[in-house]
Amino acid sequence: MSTSRRRFLVSAAGAALALPALHYTREARASETPPRLLIYFMPNGRRPEWWVPSSEDGQLVFPEGLEALQPFANRAMSCIDLANYAPWNSPGAAHAMGTATILSGRSMVMPISELQNSTTIDQIIASHIGTQSRFGSLQWSAGEPGACDVANASCAYTQAVSWADYGAPLLPTINPAAAFDRLFGSSVDGLRGVAADRRRRSLRSLLDATLDDARRLERKVGVEDRQTLQAYFTSLRELERSLVDEGSCGIQPTAPEARLPYAERVAAFHELIRLAFQCDQTRVLSFMIEFGLSGRSHDFLGAPGTHHGLSHLPDEDAYDRLRIVEQWQNNQFAQLLTLLDETPGATDGASVLDETLVIGISSMGEGSQHRHGRNCPLLVSGSSLLQTNGQQQDFGATRPLTDLWVTLLEAYGIGGTYGPDGARFGEDGTTVIDGVIG
Amino acid sequence: MRRRLVASTALWLATSCRLIEPYRPPPPTEPEAEVPPPAYVAHNPLHRLNAIEFDNTVRDLLGTTLQPGRDFPPDSASGGFDNNAAALSITPTWFAAAVRAAEQVVDEALWVGSVYERAYLGEALVTEEGYPLGELWALSGEPLTLTIEVPEDGDYELAFVAGGVQTGDAVAPLLDVSIDGEVRFGDVAIEGTPAAPGRHLFWVTLTAGEHTVTLDPTNFQNWAPANRHNDVAIEEVVVRSGQAAYGPGYARVFHCDPDPVERPECATEVIVRFAQRAWRRPLAVEERAALLLLHDTVLRDGESPVDAVRLVIRHILASPKFLFRTPSLDPAWTDFELATRLSYFIWGTTPDDELLAKADAGDLSTLQGRRETVVAMLADPRSRALLDGFAEQWLGVRAMKQAAPSPELFPGFTDEVRSAMADEARSLFGDFLANGAPVDRLLDPGFSYLDDDLALHYGLPPVGSLDVQRTPVARDQRQGLLTLGSWLVAKSDAEHGSPIRRGRWVSENVLCVDIPPPPADLEIPEFEIGVGELTVREQLERHRDDVACAACHELLDVVGIGFEGFDASGAPVPGEVDDLGELPGGPTFEGAAGLTDIVDRRRFAQCVRKKLFTYAMGRIPDEVDKHWLDHAPIADSTLPDLILQITTSPLFHDPPEGGE
């Protein structure tokens, strides 16, 4: 009974938040603070036929099975075949190298068991726009550790897309309850982990029982005592809120439960991303739906076999299963966009998506050939930072991916040089891409 | 009837000091007239525990040594006492503090653990080849070696919390557990995952001193192209003695082992017994059911048997039925409500099992039973709570502890003196709980409580003791309530005693003449005692030139001047002092001794009774209360007599059978 009451509260809050976002005028954007940045990482490459939209009459059309992205077509920019040269220049040129370098553009040398790499683009942006919020940046993943890549590569290379500095991977939090705890609470009764999750549930039962108990008392006392009890009820409600609410900006977030199955864990992280942005806990976040080289078997989708194994297309059957896996992940990206678009932002009439730049990106292009030269990130935002207006640019597998990050630096108004030998960012990022900055 | 009385109370409050009955000499004979029974039974509202009561109560329920109430938002006093029901509201901050306090005291008092426990986590788990995975450390095939140290020979639980990683067709990870280089548990299968690690327990016998513990993965695999991978991610390693230790309240709460398998009825017994103690009455059927339902819920959600009971206890302590003394919700519980009121009045804490049993047996409903109970309660050491709760507030002790006499002018007012002054007042009152003397002898008991520091401060010969002790004094020596350092210091300014505030204290606490506040639109002129060319008396007289002020200040100032012989640190002022005081209506007196000589003893005793009543009931007496207070027989009453009169009066509770 207590659980259902809570679910009701949460869904009622959700309903209130899901008001249709009014159209956010360009005038309103003029004075806006720079948009938040969300990197949404997907492992084992992306086959373009399920991910990359076509462009028809200046309008992006998403492939069959990804219709959920269509509502964002006029707020998106599609990049085709940007080249990430760093993994090619690194030993192995495989998943570890792709995953670790898409945001850094820096190659590695042997021994790659040692941590190398350099500050990633999201961290440079965080150092400029993340200083106002509670957390400069956050890194989360619904993934679980699996095999670490060839040549005894450090596991961190597949497990972190965000790097603070040379040799400093920002390994993501993989337990949504822990991420929630960091955002909205601390340990519960001095307990951590699973025990804290259990205790949190117990304390909710306790508060519900206390409320019922006080109500029974209320029915038995006179008018004056009922007034006294009103103050008790108010206090109880405030306590209830404070138990879940630390910087939750007045909404009532519910902590994710422990031991969520994978798909629910992804959904829980989506909800946390929404909350973290809505309550301005952070302005820069990277999320990995799974780690690079993910060996997850998506049995719950009817697509058994490790994702990585399927991505190398050993047989016909594998292609169909890979489609199911990649389409599901791509649709998760769409679901998160929908969630952010339904959530009111800081500015009147704007949604969180209107104030955020979301970049969906994989470790490489098509995965069976490790096509690092054909990465196809999708940029979505309702802000005017970039010309996310339904345009598509094909870079022919020759333009470095790092130029996109140079463009981002420029758009965010961040000066300085971050690469070696005069490169503005990474090893080869030198030039702003035309027609992208808003 | 009730409504009319309320109206007349309001009218009375609105009147000026001119209507206050002037002081009159006592009539030749005491009108020990019969008291008309009150026309209503007083409504006793929800009455929140104050900080002291909360601390005492959790101490008695759980045996905790913590005093969390000290950190609560302060209770505001009303009518001179901080246990006034009308002033004790619940605020979110207070409630949050109380709920947190419940967690702390349950944690401390009902703690169960080992006599020795040590956890190794974080940095302690770092190895060369492994890598961090959130809070965990992934071994990646490399053994983890820890040096542990145990205090004595014995059986120890060695536990490691770890999750296994398994991808593709890799085998499930296994590891060997070695102690001092010898494999003790081979090929242990890892339970759980890094997101939900499992606990792996082993019992080992260890000698005192250092040992090495090694966790060595035996079948690590990492073949990326084939997605064949396994690993062990360690969260912590714990070494714990097999010898259990318990918090101070464990034995009294858990009278049986709450293991649901061994003794399923135990948890129920523990919970019901505790709730009856905490809520100070039997449980209604649905209350009992709700508690047991909550217990089942948290137990089902995976709490341990002991934790499940501890959580229910926290709920019981957060309930309004604990935080508030409640009116009788069921006619059958009337005597329990009475036991509760007696207990918080005399003991400042929750009724014990014996008192609740008396309530259950109906002993408190008879006059004789109630009398015997109160007498027994007064004889119990817990009645010292009257000193903490009642005497400290009545005699200005708490205010004196906070007072700040000028250190330049009064270097003799040391911490020792301050502390002795508190003891002086408490001990004087405490003496009258047992000495059998009429309560009015508080004014001239023939003894005082002094230690060497306080004697020196008062300009008296040393008494040869570092703690205050009962010291016989001659009739003209400093003695009695009117010379107590506590209220004299509390009612002083930094550099000078305050005749106005001292006059008010005497009016309100000795004579029980309440002084209304100054009129709302009054402009108060600058007024500094003891400064300038005018004497204190001249200054005060100017003060009374203003007609608007005079009505009340006639009652205050002239009384207060009688205490000009005591400085702001409570010490005697050397030399000639103008301390000719005056009571309203004419009689004059010199100094505290002079007032002691002329004060109406009966009126003073009535005033003590009224103060006690205010404290006992947690309310300012209304007109019906006052009628009883002014007319009930008082002659030669001792302090325990007054307490008996109050607790057997129909105002305290339903009249006992065979009552007066």
Image: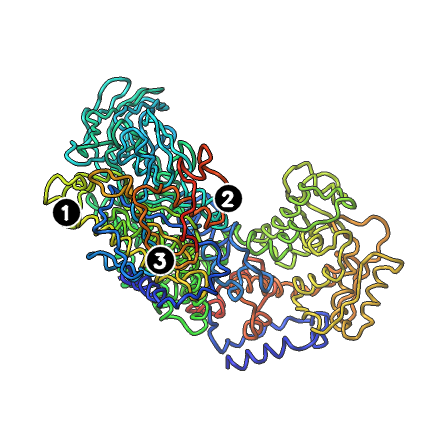
Amino acid type assigned to the residue bearing label 3 in the image: Leu
Q: Residue at x 55, y 79 (%)?
A: B5
Is B541 placed above or below A161 here? Answer: below
Task: Give x and y (percent) for residue B218.
Answer: 20, 24
Please report contact status of discs 2 and 1: CB closer than 8 Å, yes or no: no
Q: Tell me the subunit letter for badge 2.
A: A
The amino acid on which the numbered mark 1 sits, given as a three-letter code, is Arg
Provide the secondary structure element on which disc 2 rests.
loop
Q: Residue B108 in the image: x percent, y percent?
A: 40, 42
Mark 3 residue element: helix
Query: Residue A209 falls in which quadrant of the image?
Result: bottom left
x then y, percent, for residue B239: 32, 29
Provide the residue designation for mark 3. Answer: A207
- Label 1 near label 3: C-beta < 8 Å? no
In-front residue for pair A57/A329: A57
Q: Quadrant of residue A421?
A: top left
Q: CA distance from mark 3 to mark 1?
A: 46 Å
| Residue B560 against residue B306 in the figure, above or below | below
Query: For the C terminus of chain A, which image quadrant?
Result: bottom left
Q: Nearer the viewer, mark 2 or mark 3?
A: 2
Judge the density around disc 1: few (<14), some (14-19), many (≥20) Cα neighbours within 10 Å: many
Relative side of A185 to A83, left or right: right
**Callouts 2 and 3 in the same chain:** yes
Specify whether A297 is left or right of A142. left
Q: Position of residue A86 (x, y in %)?
A: 34, 35
Look at label 2 and name its amino acid: Gly
Which residue is label 1 attached to?
A321
Q: Nearer the viewer, mark 2 or mark 1?
A: 2
Query: In this rendering, does residue A346 appear at all?
Result: yes
Q: Is residue B469 above or below residue A13?
A: above
The tally of labels here is 3
